[in-house]
């Protein structure tokens, strides 16, 4: 097998860099992630190095068929770029061609993308002006309670009467959570309230894009929190389609698919 | 005759006692567990200080976000109205009040009698509130006052692109790690804050005289920027030759809402009796 048959997608986000290599059948062959920590180029290089090692391939050859995406995708030396919207859409279509809406919620922003049955991106909505509803609130709360995001979700499932978080702004919501905690609120009820409030901010974005959404997938770091997933399903009155990939790797996977198809479009 | 105004805010509770002419006593405390408890505590503190009995107070008005359901008050009034009345009571030439609190920002326009004409209030987004500056001052390890002072030394303020406090925080961290001078970062922060408040202020017809109140007024950098922007856009040069359109509160700017509530208590009592 020729060693050139790998296609690399690198998603350089605001906090993490994720990379995926696929073969010509769109199968994931290797993946890696590193924290960005103010140096996107270094994080990307380390990801490529790790993948090259895992695949026993040269970094130079891997970079030949590589596409960068993500908020900091333009800050690394890979020349070919794809927008995150297109990467998400293409990645989603490659994994689940029946899905018509893909929602991506990361630490700082959220996106909802509408895909037609041929895999074309029809429309999208983006919130990157305000962090309300983004993962940063879960991050802040998980820091405050010393639980990681997945644990947070497990605890939330023990809730009996979720507390309603009334603040929209993530900064105000964090204060609200702290004051509830100081008043002795039940922690599962409190975390469930936070998850519901995050889902409550994602829901309108989906409805704005499509009044009657049918098949929806949810990805990005926030999708790792099952309680948010569950609440979003309740609001949408449907089951979200699970993608056969870890939620945060979808843009990188999409970029790799684009690389395989010889660039954007 | 003695009247009381109690302002239960999100971070502090304030109480003002007023007789027919002037403020007899005032007090600011941090909030307690519930708004009712905050009101109760700050009211009792003022009574203790002045040796008044509770039943000698002729009329009590509550205001602020926790104003409702306080059992011992006679009436509750919104903080917008109270801020207008309070500012007018102290400075009768005031027509615009810009109050930047810990978790909100209010722009209030009043007429020559202190009656509310128009207002804009933001309590949904932390950008343009005291909280924004608090976060930024923390990043630079400065007090709110020093964040103002140090910014006056800046020659090249940084430019913050985001409005959202969370995004702006990430931008500022980036500036700090790339070695920008504290003075330039502080100046950029104050400028961004003032611009945000200005963009809200524009929704209300701004007329002189103007007073900037609330804790943020203590940051000279923000106050100066805001004054410059407002003056160049809304104040005619002929006016500024004769007067300074910006007034200073003669009392603690945090008690204006409670003072307004006490003034309303007095007016109500006089009307009913």
Image (spheres, rainbow, N blue to C red):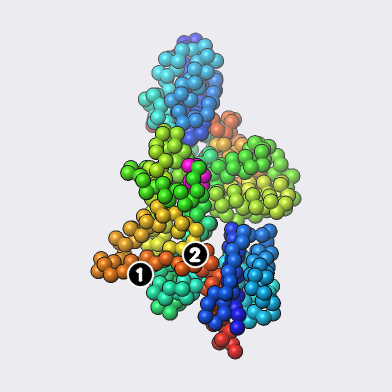
How many marks do you count on the picture?
2
| x 45%, y 67%: residue | B249
Do the residues under discs 2 and 1 have CB atoms within 8 angstroms? no
- Residue A1, compared with residue B170, is above or below; it is above
Rendered location of residue B187, percent (x, y) = 39, 47
Residue B3 appears in view: yes
State which quadrant residue A239 falls in.
Answer: top right
* Chain to which the residue tagged by mark 2 belongs: B
* Chain to which the residue tagged by mark 1 belongs: B
State which quadrant residue A258 falls in.
Answer: top left
Name the outermost residue toward the bottom. Answer: B273
Rendered location of residue B237, percent (x, y) = 25, 66
Q: Secondary structure at mark 1?
A: loop
Name the outermost residue toward the top. Answer: A1
Q: Nearer the viewer, residue A35 or B4?
A: B4
Where residue B208 is drawn, which disc sits there?
1
Residue B79 appears in view: no
The magenta segment is B135-140
Residue B233 located within the stretch drawn in magenta = no
Q: Nearer the viewer, mark 2 or mark 1?
A: 2
Principal secondary structure, stretch drawn in magenta: helix
| x 66%, y 59%: residue | B32
Q: Secondary structure at mark 2?
A: helix
Where residue B253 is drawn, which disc sits there?
2
Rendered location of residue A208, percent (x, y) = 49, 51
């Amino acid at each position: 097998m020729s060693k050139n048959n790998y296609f690399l997608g690198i998603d350089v986000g605001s906090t993490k860099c994720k990379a995926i290599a696929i073969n010509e059948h769109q199968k994931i062959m290797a993946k890696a992630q590193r924290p960005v920590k103010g140096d996107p180029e270094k994080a990307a290089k380390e990801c490529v190095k790790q993948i090259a090692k895992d695949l026993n391939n040269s970094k130079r050859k891997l970079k030949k068929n590589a596409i960068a995406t993500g908020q900091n995708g333009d800050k690394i030396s890979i020349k070919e770029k794809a927008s995150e919207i297109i990467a998400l859409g293409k990645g989603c279509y490659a994994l689940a061609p029946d899905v018509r809406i893909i929602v991506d919620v990361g630490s700082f922003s959220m996106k909802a993308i509408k895909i037609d049955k041929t895999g074309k991106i029809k429309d999208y909505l983006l919130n990157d002006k305000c962090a309300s509803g983004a993962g940063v609130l879960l991050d802040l709360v998980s820091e405050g309670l010393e639980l990681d995001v997945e644990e947070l979700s497990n605890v939330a499932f023990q809730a009996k009467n979720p507390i309603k978080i009334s603040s929209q702004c993530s900064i105000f919501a964090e204060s609200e959570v702290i004051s509830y905690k100081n008043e002795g609120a039940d922690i599962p009820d409190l975390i469930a309230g936070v998850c519901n409030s995050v889902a409550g901010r994602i829901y309108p974005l989906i409805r704005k894009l499509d009044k009657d959404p049918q098949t929806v997938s949810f990805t990005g770091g926030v999708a790792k929190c099952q309680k948010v997933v569950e609440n979003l399903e309740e609001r949408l009155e449907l089951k979200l389609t699970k993608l056969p990939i870890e939620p945060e790797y979808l843009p990188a996977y999409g970029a790799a698919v684009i690389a395989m198809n010889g660039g954007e479009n | 005759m003695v009247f009381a105004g109690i302002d239960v805010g999100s971070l502090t509770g304030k109480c003002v006692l007023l007789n027919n002419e002037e403020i007899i006593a005032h007090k600011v405390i941090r909030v307690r567990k519930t708004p009712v408890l905050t009101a109760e505590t700050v009211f009792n503190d003022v009574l203790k200080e002045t040796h008044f009995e509770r039943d000698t107070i002729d009329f009590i008005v509550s205001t602020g976000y926790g104003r409702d359901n306080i059992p011992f008050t006679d009436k509750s009034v919104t903080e917008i109205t109270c801020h207008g009345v309070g500012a007018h009571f102290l400075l009768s030439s005031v027509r615009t009040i810009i109050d930047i609190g810990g978790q909100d920002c209010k722009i209030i326009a009043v007429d020559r009698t202190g009656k509310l004409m128009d207002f804009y209030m933001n309590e949904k987004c932390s950008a343009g509130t005291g909280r924004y500056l608090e976060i930024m001052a923390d990043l630079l390890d400065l007090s709110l006052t020093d964040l103002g002072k140090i910014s006056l030394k800046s020659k090249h303020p940084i430019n913050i692109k985001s409005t959202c406090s969370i995004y702006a925080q990430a931008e500022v961290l980036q500036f700090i790690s790339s070695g920008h001078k504290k003075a330039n970062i502080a100046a950029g922060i104050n400028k961004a804050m003032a611009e945000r408040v200005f963009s809200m202020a524009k929704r209300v017809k701004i007329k002189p005289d103007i007073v900037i109140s609330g804790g943020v007024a203590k940051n000279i950098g923000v106050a100066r920027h805001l004054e410059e922007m407002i003056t160049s856009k809304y104040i005619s040069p002929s006016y500024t030759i004769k007067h300074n359109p910006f007034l200073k509160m003669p009392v603690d700017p945090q008690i204006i809402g409670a003072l307004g509530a006490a003034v309303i208590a007095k007016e109500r009592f006089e009307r009913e009796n």
